[in-house]
């Protein structure tokens, strides 16, 4: 069974995975930024901020819903988003290093 089925979502519920149009446009715009090192920096910083916000929301909701029926879903999301925070932080660190190196190289030329 796929992730959608495990979460209780049917195949027809793929629209739930879509970004709001303005967020989708922002992400596409960041990805098209030149040079590519700057695009990577912008995307990595954005992902890091978004996943940190998700983790805080999930953690706060899990704490507020302790003992309630939906607590476990929030707790699972808090755990998963904690892992995502760690990965996003590494992406941000690497992308920022790449962008800094590209800027330094550009200044030398």
Image: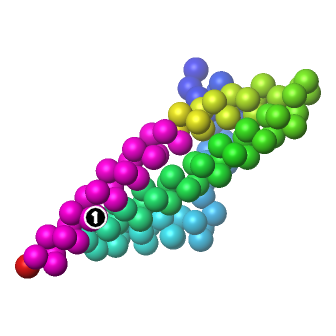
Which image quarter: residue 11?
top right
Residues 86 and 10: in front is 86
Task: Tell whether 92 sits left or right of 13.
Answer: left
Q: Is residue 10 visible?
A: no
Residue 88 higher or lower than 21, as above or below: above
Residue 19 higher or lower than 74, as above or below: below
Which image quarter: residue 80?
top right
Residue located 51% across and 70% down the image: 25
Task: Tell whether 52 sits left or right of 86.
Answer: right
Q: Position of residue 31 (x, y in %)?
A: 38, 65
Q: Position of residue 65 (x, y in %)?
A: 88, 33
Residue located 67% across and 35% down the image: 78
Q: Is residue 109 magenta?
A: no
Q: Is residue 29 visible?
A: yes
Residues 96 and 68: in front is 96
Location of mark 1 (residue): 99
Quarter the C terminus occupies: bottom left
**Part of the protein shown in magenta:** 85-108
Residue 20 higher or lower than 35, as above or below: above
Residues 105 and 50: in front is 105
Residue located 76% across and 33% down the image: 74
- Coloration mode: rainbow
Quarter the N terminus occupies: top right
SS of the residue under disc 1: helix
User: Magenta stretch: dominant SS?
Assistant: helix
Q: Is residue 87 magenta?
A: yes
Q: Position of residue 10 (x, y in %)?
A: 68, 34
Q: Position of residue 106 (x, y in %)?
A: 15, 75
Q: Residue furthest right?
A: 68
Residue located 34% across and 66% down the image: 39
Q: Residue furthest top?
A: 1
Question: Number of callouts in the render?
Answer: 1
């Amino acid at each position: 069974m796929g992730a959608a089925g495990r979460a209780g979502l049917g195949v027809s519920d793929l629209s739930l995975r879509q970004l709001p149009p303005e967020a989708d446009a922002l992400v596409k715009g960041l990805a098209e930024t030149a040079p590519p090192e700057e695009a990577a920096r912008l995307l990595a910083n954005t992902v890091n901020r978004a996943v940190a916000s998700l983790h805080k929301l999930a953690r706060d909701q899990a704490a507020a819903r302790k003992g309630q029926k939906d607590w476990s879903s929030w707790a699972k999301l808090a755990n998963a988003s904690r892992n995502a925070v760690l990965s996003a932080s590494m992406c941000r660190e690497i992308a920022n290093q790449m962008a800094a190196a590209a800027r330094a190289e550009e200044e030398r030329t």
